[in-house]
Image: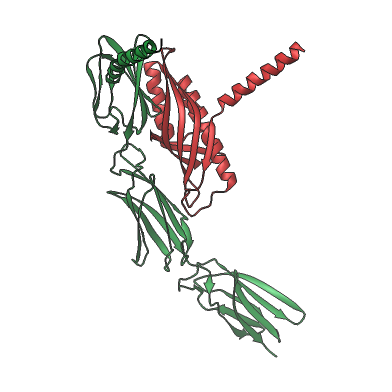
Chain colours: A red, B green
Amino acid sequence: MLKHFALVCASIILASGMVAAQPVVTVDTSQLKGPRPLEDQTKAAAIRDYLESWQAMNEAFQQNQPNLLDEDFIGTARGKLADTIDEQAKARIQTRYHDRVHHIQFLFYSPEGLSIELIDDAEYDVQVLDHDKPVSTVPVSARYIVVLSPAEIRWKVRVMQADSK
Amino acid sequence: MKPTLTFLLVSLTVAIMPAAHAQDETLNVPRSIEAGSAFSIQNAGSGEAALYIVGPGQVLKRTVQLGTSTYFPAGSICNAGHYVVILAQGSGTTTRSFDVTPVSVPANLSFLAKPSRLPVGLHDGITGAVYVFDVYHNLIAAPTPVSFELSSPSGAVQKQQVSTRDGAAWTAMDSTSQQGSSKFVAQAGDVSSTNIIRQVPGDPCDLKVSAQPSGQQLDLQTAPVRDCSGNAVPDGTIVTFTETYPGGQSTVDVPLKRDIAEVKMPARDGATITVASGVVLGNQIRWGK
């Protein structure tokens, strides 16, 4: 009985941990402009790939490994993020980006289907480590403008640029 | 007891207020700066501290003397974004944030036009989408005027002026009535980007065939094949001649050569000869009885 109770508790703790790790995501397509309709399947793929790009960014910045960006970022975004990781590595800094909330608003689906632009009102925590020692963790609210481009099998982030909400 | 508690709360508030004020002054950062411009961060106190400026777009670390102003020369931060500033001394930290905004002058355009080849005379057949960037490849989110211009081989020009929304603008234009290469130009400020759009003749229009007897054969020949705008249909386009006669039918596919398709077919009494190209049907000839 006690063993069963412990198992249930462990499951709840694990489940709550998993839920806590997932950001809250809302999606709005009411502001979408452009002549091309955004099909549900395309929308779902764009959201999935964009959210995965945050995980990739977190891992790349945490490990100072720019190659971890390759699957999710392309063009300007990839170049700028990789440069930042190089700067971090030189200064022996690491950063962790833990995203908590994404309010995604689709803005533009280009007529030829080669780009999707969205705004993400994101909330996340940035933790800075210097020589592996935590310096500070700062909660951030920022509005990201994001442009996605279709690659071989997924949408990749081409532009990712933030300002204050 | 109650007055004592109130007194304590008031005293505590009064004691905290100057401290909070002092905390605000320990780190003074601009609310926003333009990408690439110089800026300073002021801090209060004494001793040495580490100053971090952190964002996905750039990371800077400086060792600073508290009580001084730290100067960042032009070009220190060029990537637009939201940056966190952390001043760390010992175990204590003070944090602020600021934005780096794009330079408002367009310097780069990402211009995609589709398709690169299409038939003449298509309404809204050509689309173009543009993203406007500054000199540091930051997306200029502020509304920026963009002009689109499609010039046809005949010199006719279609123009549209639009404003970007969050850095993006698009347009749709008609393909022209004349075949050839058109320049499709997007311009924002002093920067422009050009795509070449090849416009090809449309489907044949008013397909006509004539027949001349030649012994036991008929020489069948089309008039020069044109599209509905008068452009010559490209050589190689297939024209199908069909001869239907009592008891049978024969069909010959002939590619256009110098605008004309020609073929010899048996001259059969009572035959009906038709000509077609794609979905376009031409005239019909009855031969013999």
- Say if A57 sits above or below B86 in the image: below
A9 relative to A79 in the view: left or right:
right
Q: Residue at x 48, y 52 (%)?
A: A111
Of A143 and B127, the residue lying toward us = A143
Residue at the limit of the structure toward the bottom, as seen here: B289
Q: Residue at x 37, y 14 (%)?
A: B6
Res. A71 in view: no
Percent position (x, y) of residue B71?
23, 22
- Say if B131 sits above or below B19 in the image: below
How many marks on residues? Answer: 0
Percent position (x, y) of residue B279?
60, 70
Percent position (x, y) of residue B150?
37, 60
Q: Quadrant of residue B102?
A: top left
Q: Residue at x 26, y 9 (%)?
A: B47
Of A2 and B114, the residue lying toward us = A2
Of A22 and B133, the residue lying toward us = A22
- Say if B272 sits above or below B138 in the image: below
B106 relative to A39 in the view: left or right:
left
Res. B147 in view: yes
The quadrant of the rendering that contains the C terminus of chain B is: bottom right
The quadrant of the rendering that contains the N terminus of chain B is: top left
Percent position (x, y) of residue A164?
37, 33
Q: Quadrant of residue A45?
A: top right
